[in-house]
Every structure is written in C-alpha cells, then in structure tokens.
Image: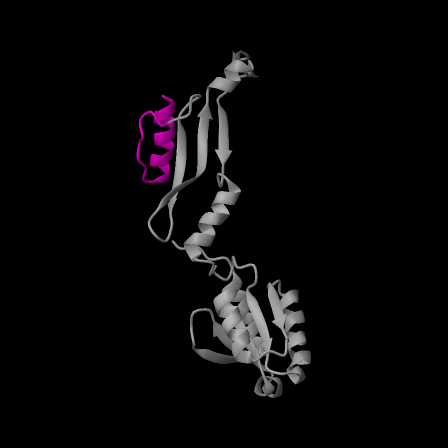
Amino acid sequence: MAESALAGALDKLGRKYKINPGDGAFYGPKLDFKIKDAIGRMWQCGTIQLDFNLPERFDVTYIGEDGEKHRPVMLHRVIYGSIERFIGILIEHYAGAFPMWLAPVQVKVMTINDECVPYAKEIMAKLDELGIRAELDDRTETIGYKIREANGRYRIPMQLIIGKNEVENKEVNIRRFGSKDQFSKSLDEFYNYVVDEAAIKFDK
C-alpha cells in the first residue's frame, strides 16, 4: 500500500520513475532523486522516505475526526543528501565554471592603469547596490595577465575591462568566460544586462 501511494503521487505529478524492489529503508519505502552529471554518472541526492517504524516505536498517535486515536506515518525529507557531496558534484559538473547566478564572484572589474581606478570603483559601488557579487582587480599587472587569471584560474563568468576609452565614453568593455569576443555597453545598458544575466535560470 505504501509503495502504491508513492507511485500514485508520482503518477499524479506526471513524473517518470523506476521501481527498485528491496531498495527501501528498513522502516518503509522511499523516493530517491538521482541526478546525472556532465560525464554521465548518476548521483543520489534528495530523498523522501515513509517511516512506519518510529511512530510505532515511540507510540505516536493523533486524534482523528472520528474522535479515535490513529497512528501517523512519518515523512523524512532530505533535499540535497550530504551537502558536502552535493557541492562536490556541482563543482565537478561545471568544472569550476559555474553559471553566473551561482558563481561566488559574478563579475571581475579589471583596470588597465591607475587612472581608470576611480571610474572602476564607481562601477563597483553600483554593482554592490544591485546585489551583484563583484571584485575589483586594480593591481599594476598587465591587462593580459588579469584576463588570463580571471579566465584560467578563477573562471569568472563576466569580466569588465576598464581603460581610457571606457572612462571617456562612460561605458564598459565586456568579456564572457570561455569566449574571446568582446563588446561594449553604456553603463545603463550594462546594469540592465548584468542584472538579467545574474538572475537564477533553470533548464526546462
């Protein structure tokens, strides 16, 4: 009956599932949610378990509409499984190059020289106001070195190059991780663009 209830719930939701006889916990059947990583490996993460054992063991009851005592069924819900393992799966799946909404640092602002730093700091302040996770690289390293580091070592999704032209035209030069293409936007266009790009997106 318990297995039928779980299967019926999945059928009602229109979800595909596979039955593994004998794979339930000792206290009752369960739903395991498995995800496939980038190289095809399957990982069990979330689970919902029906527990008929503990309510009996602890003599848990409730009073029903009929005024009589009834034994409840306990539900165990685990969203991620081990959170450490889940984070490890994410890192491996994305090879460290997280989508922008998930990346610890979403935007790296890189200056070409010291004269560009005040303008870059204005951009940083606005990004902070917009809730964008950004870092400023105003070191005296070459811009090529900064770009290689942002792409190769840190895999920052969006990188801004700030030089003399950007300061004079009140715009930003944008690079995306994994692409050599660059494009420019005015500040207002960029702020709208970065907020949209940083929004949480799910594959359907």
Q: Measured from the top left, where is residue 19 in percent x and y? A: 31, 31
* Residue 24, percent from left and from top: 38, 26
Image height of 23 relative to 118, above or below: above
Colour scheme employed for the rendering of this structure? one colour
x and y percentages locating residue 138 in the rendered image: 64, 75
The answer to whether one can see residue 193 in this image is: no
Classify 90 as above or below 75: below
How many numbered callouts?
0
Residue at 34 percent across and 31 percent down: it is 7
- Compared with residue 82, is residue 2 higher up or lower down, i.e. above or below? above
- Relative to the observer, which residue lies in front, 134 or 144? 144
Depth order, front residue of 14/76: 76
Q: Is residue 169 magenta?
A: no
Residue drawn at (61%, 88%) of the image: 168
Image quadrant where one finds the N terminus: top left
Which residue corresponds to the image point at 54% horizontal and 69% vertical from the top-left?
Answer: 194
Q: Say left or right for 177 vs 164.
A: left
- Residue 172, located in which quarter of the rendered image? bottom right
Q: From which residue to which does the magenta span run? A: 1-23
Residue 107 is situated, as x and y percent measured from the top left of the image, at 56, 68
Q: Specify the quadrant of the image occupied by residue 135.
A: bottom right
Magenta region includes residue 5? yes
| The furthest residue to the right | 118
